Image (tube, helix red, strand yellow):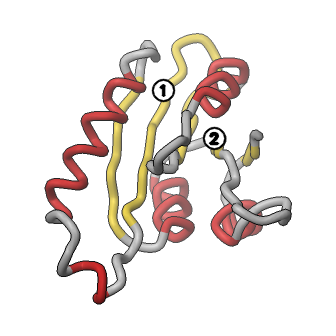
Amino acid sequence: MYKHILMPLAYQPGHSPKVETRAARAISAPGAHITLLHVIGPIPEFRSEHATTREGLAEVIRHDLERIANDFVDAEVEVREGDPATQILDLADAGDIDCIVMAPHRSDAADYGSTAAQVLRHAPCTVHLVR
């Protein structure tokens, strides 16, 4: 059983984190700490002029993740900007994370995407990919 689980979550229409939260509960030790993470990736310049402010976007995401965090006894929310794999690995390296639970997101037939592949390859802890 794991004491500190990092749960990176995609924030996109139609994605529900039920699979990730179910898996995190199943493998967490009593009193485990859960860190929910979303990484806002780079917005292409041609789209950034039409996008809402990044701060506003981060606050909306944080608010939604806090609702999910309320389902856990001990959880926190982090919203970061940058490359998703890099941010996930940096947080795992810096903290006392002993497990990462994430769902690989692909729109094609591949088993998992580049973010999941990088996390699997370089994580300093156990990684559970769930579908």
Q: CA distance from mark 1 to mark 2?
A: 10 Å
Residue type at mark 2 is Asp
Camera-side residue: 17 or 71?
17
Q: Is residue 20 placed above or below 46 in the rendered structure? A: above
Q: Amino acid at mark 1?
A: His
Q: Which mark is residue 33?
A: 1
Mark number, residue 130: none
Q: Residue at x 37, y 63 (%)?
A: 40
Q: Position of residue 19 (x, y in %)?
A: 67, 30
Judge from the rendering whether residue 16 lies leftward or rightward of residue 129; answer left or right.
Answer: left
Which secondary structure lies at badge 1?
Answer: strand
Q: Residue at x 33, y 59 (%)?
A: 80
What residue is rendered at 53% in x and 42% in y?
14
| Residue 87 placement, left or right of 98 | left
Q: Quadrant of the C terminus?
A: top right
125 displayed left or right of 81:
right
The part of the image, by quadrant, that contains residue 114 is bottom right
Which of the two labelled residues, at mark 1 and mark 2, occupies the earlier sequence position? 1
Q: Relative to 130, is 121 above or below? A: below
For mark 1, does the 10 Å Cα neighbourhood hold few (<14), some (14 to 19), or many (20 or more) residues? some
Q: Quadrant of residue 50?
A: bottom left
Quick one: 22 or 29, which is closer to the camera?
A: 22
Task: Name the residue at the bottom extreme.
Answer: 46
Can you give x and y, in whole percent of width and height, for residue 127 in the image? 73, 48
Please determine whether, in this image, residue 129 is positioned above or below residue 105.
above
The relative height of residue 6 versus residue 27 in the rendered view (above or below) is below
For the N terminus, the quadrant is top right
Residue holding disc 2: 98
Examine the image and state in which quarter residue 44 appears: bottom left
Helix, strand or loop at mark 2: loop
Disc 2 packing (10 Å; few <14; some 14–19; many ≥20) = some
